């Protein structure tokens, strides 16, 4: 869209979204952080949707456009001026239509300074959930440091009224610091350390999922998530707290979490073409924190007889001046996680360098995902466990997953970026 048209569309979307929210009597939950926002939003939805009528962002519609579209329950017009014209007409009528949801859960994405302020000009959450702050969105025109990222994201918590609830990660010193000056009764911390009000201990993982002990107020209860990745316990904890804060019992929240499913591309298990092979699909995106966690998950899974652990790692985007250092730091974790590494992209060569320096023998380098598809797909053998992890733009490893999965006809339902518009990029 041209700049004038884009600004005009955004102006009316915001206007109509705010009009619709004016008469909304339910609860609004805002979710931010650098890692796991979408998974956290969906975990909260899984819990609350068992007791309430809940509206949430579709996919990652968490931007200045995505937020009002979510509130208006409309899809994007993408690059079509005609579609946007008709969408604005729908938006007007939707703005005067009553919202039947009792809870609205909004993932609030921040890529550059001012983004959170823009989102907060549309909506004022009653509950703010903030996870850890990690080194992402550090390219030119985005943020200059972790402190800058924190300052922008923390606006969500700082905007909360005196009677609003803050749910904060205790595993990040910056985020934990936001408890100062807030009511203890309305401020809850979560995490894996001793400082958390609600904490997870004794975390165990298998191909059947993750089990852990949930600890609160002197009480300890065993919980189960049917997903891979110990770090996903960190998205379940705020979901439990949201359920408790809205009057659900602990037993109800834990039972609801047994139905939790990860969004596409977030370490989902997909059956591979080769007999017994499994793909761990983390192709949605990648950052230093999430990539290391994914490698930890791979390291703890044991292949069946004759199987190998394979890591396919693509570039991590938007890391700015520290990109080389951060890629090298992740590369140090590779050797202990897999038997074979396939590095995809220029920066990912640093993964390969680090793996070789630490003694990994089977290391392959590919220029892009098509090069990977053409030259690596046949290297996957029976009973292999294959982690696929990379960033979005100019990486697109979901294309490899589609080639390597047993039933590619299921790609539309199981993989990210399968819409018609993505096929043109």
Image (cartoon, rainbow, N blue to C red):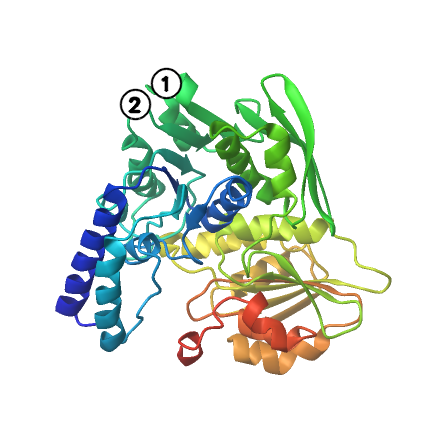
Q: Is residue 37 visible?
A: yes
Q: Residues within 10 Å of mark 2 (few under 14, many from 20)?
A: few
* Residue 141 or residue 50, whichever sits in front: 50
CB atoms at circles 1 and 2 under 8 Å apart? yes
382 relative to 152 in the view: left or right: right
Q: Residues within 10 Å of mark 1 (few under 14, many from 20)?
A: some
Q: x and y percent of residue 32 in the render?
A: 39, 43
Rendered-image quadrant of the C terminus? bottom left
Q: CA distance from mark 1 to mark 2?
A: 8 Å
Q: x and y percent of residue 266 in the render?
A: 56, 56
Q: Is residue 32 visible?
A: no
* Residue 158 or residue 300, whichever sits in front: 158
14 relative to 399 in the view: left or right: left
Q: Which residue is mark 2?
A: 162
Residue at coordinates 21% horizontally, 71% vertically from top-left? 85
Residue at coordinates 34% horizontally, 39% vertically from top-left? 150
Residue at coordinates 47% horizontally, 64% vertically from top-left? 347
| SS for dot 1 | loop
Rendered-image quadrant of the N terminus? bottom left
Residue at coordinates 45% horizontally, 58% vertically from top-left? 59
Q: Which residue is mark 1?
A: 183
């Amino acid at each position: 869209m041209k700049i004038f048209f884009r600004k005009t569309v955004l102006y009316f979307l915001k206007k109509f979204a705010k009009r619709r929210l004016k008469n909304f009597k339910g609860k609004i939950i805002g979710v931010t952080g650098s890692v796991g926002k979408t998974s956290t939003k969906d975990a909260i939805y899984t819990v609350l949707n068992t007791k309430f009528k809940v509206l949430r962002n579709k996919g990652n519609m968490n931007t200045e456009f995505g937020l009002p579209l979510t509130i208006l329950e409309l899809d994007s017009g993408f690059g079509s001026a005609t579609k946007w014209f008709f969408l604005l007409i729908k938006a007007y009528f939707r703005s005067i239509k009553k919202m039947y949801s009792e809870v609205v859960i909004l993932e609030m994405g921040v890529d550059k300074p001012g983004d959170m302020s823009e989102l907060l000009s549309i909506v004022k959450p009653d509950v703010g959930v903030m996870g850890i702050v990690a080194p992402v969105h550090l390219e030119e025109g985005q943020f200059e440091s972790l402190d800058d990222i924190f300052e922008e994201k923390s606006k969500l918590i700082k905007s909360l009224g005196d009677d609003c609830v803050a749910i904060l990660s205790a595993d990040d010193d910056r985020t934990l610091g936001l408890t100062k000056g807030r009511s203890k009764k309305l401020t809850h911390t979560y995490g894996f350390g001793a400082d958390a009000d609600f904490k997870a201990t004794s975390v165990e993982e298998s191909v059947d999922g993750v089990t852990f002990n949930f600890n609160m107020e002197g009480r300890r209860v065993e919980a189960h998530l049917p997903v891979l990745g110990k770090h996903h316990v960190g998205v379940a904890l705020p979901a439990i707290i949201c359920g408790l804060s809205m009057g659900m019992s602990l037993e109800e929240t834990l039972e609801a979490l047994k139905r939790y499913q990860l969004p596409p591309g977030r370490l989902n298990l997909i059956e591979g073409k080769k007999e017994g092979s499994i793909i761990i699909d983390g192709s949605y995106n990648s950052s230093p924190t999430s990539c290391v966690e994914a490698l930890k998950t791979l390291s703890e899974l044991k292949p069946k007889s004759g199987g190998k652990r394979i890591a396919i790692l693509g570039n991590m985007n938007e890391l700015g001046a520290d990109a080389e250092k951060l890629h090298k730091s992740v590369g140090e974790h590779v050797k202990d996680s897999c038997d074979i590494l396939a590095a995809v992209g220029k920066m990912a060569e640093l993964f390969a360098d680090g793996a070789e320096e630490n003694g990994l023998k089977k290391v392959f380098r590919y220029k892009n995902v098509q090069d990977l598809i053409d030259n690596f797909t046949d290297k996957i053998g029976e009973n292999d466990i294959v982690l696929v992890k990379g960033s979005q733009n100019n990486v697109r490893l979901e294309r490899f997953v589609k080639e390597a999965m047993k039933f590619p006809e299921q790609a539309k339902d199981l993989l990210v970026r399968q819409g018609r518009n993505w096929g043109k990029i």
